[in-house]
Image (cartoon, rainbow, N blue to C red):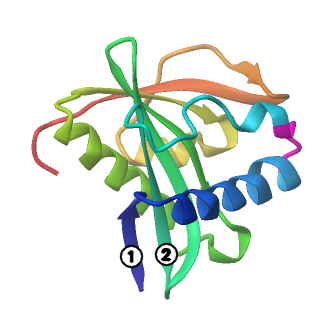
Amino acid sequence: MITVEMIDSKEQLQQAFEIREKVFVAEQGVPLEDEFDEYDRLDGRCRHLLVYWEGQPAATGRIREASGYGKLERICVLQPFRNYGLGKSVVAALEDAARLQEWRQLKLHGQTHAEGFYRKLGYSVASPEFMEDGIPHYIMTKELSGAR
């Protein structure tokens, strides 16, 4: 069973950090100092979420305002929980958070191997391929409608 919660405690934020460290740092080789930034706080500038699979923290993501867009970031799912639809749940919840902020344009830096995943969710490639932390990415965008 999938449960999605917006993060509102330091304990939950730490769980999200642990997921990100396992996926981005340990699995994908992103330098630890590049993974965490000034938006990794509970100060309202960024909304973080956790997705649970049968009560276990399994996926995370965040959204913030960036140049008039809602920018989806740090979306990841722990390896044992992939292929259960958790990534889709992360994106849907971040889109709901964007609607609450009345952001109608979304963007993300999607790893090129995830292009098909984001395309199925309505995102379009909006840039040439570029490197970020040694991993090829595209900027992807979506116009958000009012109803899901």
Q: Is residue 58 magenta?
A: no
Q: Please, is residue 41 above or below residue 126 in the view?
A: below
Query: Is residue 124 visible to the viewer in this orientation of the structure?
Result: yes
User: In terms of image quadrants, where is residue 143?
Assistant: top left
Q: Does the segment drawn in magenta span residue 29?
A: yes
Q: Looking at numbered disc 2 in the image, what kind of residue is underneath it?
A: Tyr
Instruction: Return the mark for residue 3.
Output: 1
Residue density around tag 1, few if under 14, some if 14–19, many if 20 or more, within 10 Å = some
Tally of numbered discs: 2
Query: Could you say where residue 125 lies in the image, as x and y percent from the top left?
Result: 49, 24
In front here: 140 or 51?
51
The boundaries of the magenta stretch are: 28-32
Picture residue at 53% right of the left edge, 64% below the top: 12
Q: Residues within 10 Å of mark 2 (few under 14, many from 20)?
A: some
Q: Secondary structure at mark 1?
A: strand
Three-letter amino acid code at disc 1? Thr
At x 60% / y 28%, what residue is drawn? 38
Name the side, left or right, on which 2 lies relative to 16: left
Can you tell which mark lies on residue 85? Answer: none
- In the rendering, at what x and y percent does residue 59 appear? 56, 63
Give how far across and how far down residue 116 sits, in percent. 54, 45
Distance (Cα) linking label 2 and label 1: 5 Å
Q: Are marks 2 and 1 in contact (CB under 8 Å)?
A: yes
Q: Name the residue beneath numbered marker 2.
A: 52
For label 2, the SS is strand
Residue at 71% from the left image edge and 61% from the top image edge = 18
Looking at the rendering, which quadrant does residue 45 occupy? top left
Mark 2 or mark 1: whose residue is earlier in sequence: 1
Q: Image check: 145 left or right of 4? A: left
